[in-house]
Amino acid sequence: MSEKTPGISFQNRMDNIVEDYRELGNLAIRLNGDVVKLLENYDESVHKSISTGSNTLDIKTINLERVCIRFMATEQPLAKDLLFIESMLRVISHIKRVGHLCAKIADSIRNIREVPIPEKILNQLALMGEYIGVMLKKSFSVFINHDLDKARELDSDDDKIDELYDSILNEVTSTMINDAEFAPYIIDTIFLARYMERIADKAVSIGSRTIFMITLKRPGIDE
């Protein structure tokens, strides 16, 4: 993570912050990918890796938050740069939450690892995870590249996640009615899907913050 270095230029410090942000984004994307792998084939070592990775992401986000706050205090950036750093702090909090959610998903998967989950539900969950991975990549990219058009796409991307989530809930309910053995595991399965949906919400929030950073208008409120 970036540290204060005597004599380092304003732009170099900004570049270091961006580099650290990219590192956080890549780690969050990796954790989501590991969640999909764990869902398809449970492996205790992968579960442990997700838990460790979530803790690492937590520490790194806290460190970058400190760097950003120190940067604002010492450099006193103006206008565009100030808005970028303030937005960075908000985005970092969303990335941190992605790590927490990945760890919760991994725990839910562990709880149902020996349950014969219907293939249709597993396939929908895996598809949901893969699509969320695409959304995360897009959200991290649009923020750093100030890509307004793609930032606006994230809201409609989330509609696909909502459709999958609703479909999974319907399938889980149907399975519970027809298979009493599945009933004890319904909560973990629903939580799993809900946590995944919330990761998608974080991607949308990053897109919304990007839109505000560029336009100074809140999506759906000022626009």
Image (cartoon, rainbow, N blue to C red):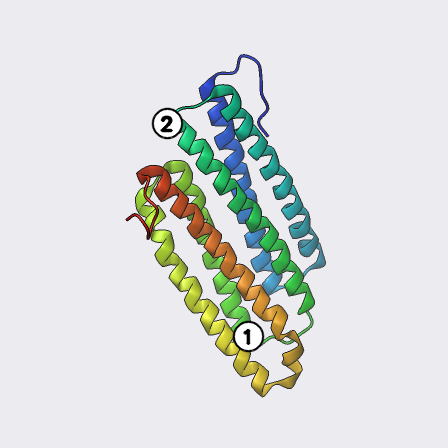
Q: Position of residue 178 (x, y in %)?
A: 57, 87
**Is residue 120 or residue 185 the one in the foreground?**
185
In-image side of 63 versus 79 (left or right): right
Q: Amino acid at mark 2?
A: Ala
Q: Is residue 129 visible?
A: no
> Which residue is disc 2 drawn over?
79
Q: Within the image, what quadrant is residue 36 found in?
A: bottom right
Relative to 5, residue 137 above or below:
below
How far is mark 2 from mark 1, CA to CA?
52 Å
Disc 2 packing (10 Å; few <14; some 14–19; many ≥20)? few
Give the residue drawn at x 61%, y 60%.
105
In-image side of 21 versus 156 (left or right): right
Q: Residue furthest left?
A: 223
Determine which of the numbered discs, if any, sits on residue 119 in the image.
Answer: 1
Mark 2 vs mark 1: in front: 2
Determine which of the numbered discs, if any, sits on residue 75 in the image.
Answer: none
Quarter of the image with the N terminus is top right
Q: Amino acid at mark 1?
A: Glu
Q: Position of residue 163 (x, y in %)?
A: 42, 68
